[in-house]
Image (cartoon, rainbow, N blue to C red):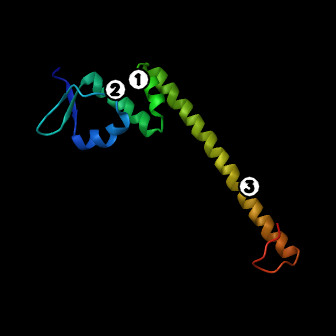
Amino acid sequence: MSAKSAFLSEKTSNAEGKRWIGLLAPARVDEWTGYRYYEEEQAMLFVRIKNLQQADFSIEEIKSLLGRNDDNVLAAFERKVEEQEQKLAKIRKIQKSYLEETMEMRNKGARDGIDEGMIMI
């Protein structure tokens, strides 16, 4: 192990690591403290995995990005942002439709003289 090794506490690695089984194995685990030690390169990989996971990439997507360079990873983040923006736009459109439809139904009921609390569909 190089002089530039990093470690994660057992709590950190277990809480997050269970979702990453098979993605990153520590170079060494301290038997007394449970700390998992990683080589510098592994620590960089951990950062990549952690950030991809936090951005809602699937395990399959993460696996496909592990051997890629930073430009590919950043491009994947851009695609993920675009996907999320499209989802958000769809939700906002549905929200607007909901508001318009409920207002229209309330106004129609008032215009048509339907008893309060009753709605005609």
Residue behind mark 3: 97
- Give me the residue at 67% from left, 45% from top: 90
Tell me: 30 left or right of 108: left
Residue neighbourhood size for the residue with mark 3, other residues' Cα within 10 Å, grouped as few (<14), some (14–19), many (≥20): few
Residue behind mark 2: 45
> Disc 2 marks which amino acid?
Leu
Question: Could you tell which of marks 1 and 3 lies nearer the N-terminus?
Answer: 1
User: What is the C-alpha distance between the residues marked 3 and 2?
Assistant: 44 Å
- Give me the residue at 22% from left, 40% from top: 9
Q: Are marks 1 and 3 in contact (CB under 8 Å)?
A: no
Quarter of the figure that contains the N terminus = top left
> Disc 3 marks which amino acid?
Ser
Above or below for 119 versus 86: below
Tell me: 72 left or right of 45: right
Question: Could you tell which of marks 1 and 2 lies nearer the N-terminus?
Answer: 2
Q: Are marks 1 and 2 in contact (CB under 8 Å)?
A: yes
Residue behind mark 1: 66
Nearer to us in this view, 63 or 1: 63
> Disc 1 marks which amino acid?
Leu
Q: How many marks?
A: 3
Q: Give residue 36's position: percent from left, percent from top.
A: 21, 33
Tell me: 26 left or right of 104: left
Residue neighbourhood size for the residue with mark 1, other residues' Cα within 10 Å, grouped as few (<14), some (14–19), many (≥20): some
User: What is the C-alpha distance between the residues marked 1 and 3?
Assistant: 41 Å
